[in-house]
Each structure stands twice: as structure tokens, then as C-alpha cells.
Image (cartoon, rainbow, N blue to C red):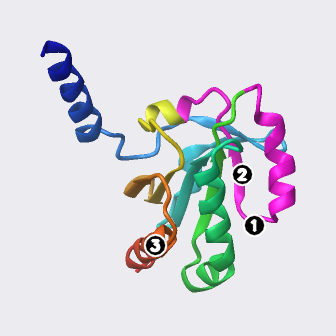
Amino acid sequence: MKVIFSLISSLFFLITFAQSELPDMTLKSLDGTDVNIQDISKNDQIVIVSLWATWCVPCINELDAISEVWEQWKDETNVKLYAISVDDARSVRRVRPMINGKSWDYEFLLDTNNDLRRILGAATVPLTMVVKNNQIIYRHSGYTPGAEDELYEKVVNNSK
């Protein structure tokens, strides 16, 4: 009984106190450039941040679904998408070939130590967030077909 209570309490704590803003930390771009994560969402810029991995089928499905409507989204809302790979040192070598094969038109960053993933409390990927001025205004974990429509609505409603 104590174990169950402890697990429930821990889960409640994580949900209640989940990170509400992007942390001040640096990630690497695919070309090795340092990018401070707080620099991606300044001056009322709406950004989508998607934590994903090459081994995660729902992650790939979500990025593929967004890709189909991405040009329209950018034209209508000026949104940017940062796809942050949480592939570790063993699987990070698969990131660039996958991106090249998919023709995704996003910004890509690497979180090979999973530091950002841990800070954000992302137990699973994909974790998709809408961010404005470093404040996380929408957060969704997992992917089901059609979830990109809800994501688009959050972007539109917060870009005004």
C-alpha cells in the first residue's frame, strides 16, 4: 500500500510541477553549433518544440504528418519547429540520414545526454510543445493521427 501511495504521489508531483518554461541550456545543432534553447523563442515568436528519436515510430509519424501541412502553417502563422533528437551516443548517427531521407524542413537540435528531456520531465517521446517567449503554453505527449490539427489550433490561437 505504501508503494502504491508513493508512486501516485510521485506522479502527481511530476504532473503538477512540470517545467513551465524552456530552461537556460545549450544544445548542439546538426553542424555542431551551440544553440541556447532560450534563444529560439524570443520576441513573441511562436515555436513548436518536438522531442523525438529515430527509433520512435510515433515521433516519425508526427513529424511526417506535420510536414504535409508545414508550408501552409509557416505562411499563415510564421511558426518555427525545432525537432530535438533525444537519440543517445549509440543511435545519434542515424539522425542525419533519417532527416535527409524525409525532407523535413525543420530546425534540428541534439539532446544526446537527454538533459533537456529530463528537465522537461518527458517520460516518453514524442513530447510536443508550443512555446512563446520561453513559456510552454501547450504540451502533448504521444501521437495519434489528427493530433497535428489540435497543435495547429494552439499555434493559431497563441500567435495573435
Looking at this view, is 111 or 140 the one in front? 140
State left or right for residue 114 relative to residue 154.
right
Whether the magenta-drawn stretch holds residue 66 is answered as no
Magenta range is: 89-116
Mark 3 or mark 1: name the one nearer the start of the chain: 1
The local secondary structure at tag 2 comes to strand
The local secondary structure at tag 3 comes to helix
Disc 2 residue crowd, few under 14, some 14–19, many 20+, Cα 10 Å: many
Counting from the top left corner in percent of width and height, residue 120 is at 44, 38
**Which image quadrant for residue 55?**
top right
Q: Which residue is mark 2?
A: 108
The answer to whether residue 65 is above or below residue 126 is: below
Q: CA distance from mark 3 to mark 1?
A: 17 Å
Report the residue at 29% width, 34% height from top: 14
Counting from the top left corner in percent of width and height, residue 149 is at 47, 76
Q: Which residue is mark 1?
A: 105
Looking at this view, is 24 or 150 the one in front? 150
Disc 3 residue crowd, few under 14, some 14–19, many 20+, Cα 10 Å: many
Counting from the top left corner in percent of width and height, residue 65 is at 62, 70
The answer to whether residue 88 is above or below residue 32 is: above
Amino acid type, mark 3 = Val
Looking at this view, is 109 or 52 the one in front? 52
Mark 3 or mark 2: name the one nearer the start of the chain: 2
Counting from the top left corner in percent of width and height, residue 139 is at 40, 55
Residue 155 is marked as 3
Report the residue at 78% width, 41% height from top: 33
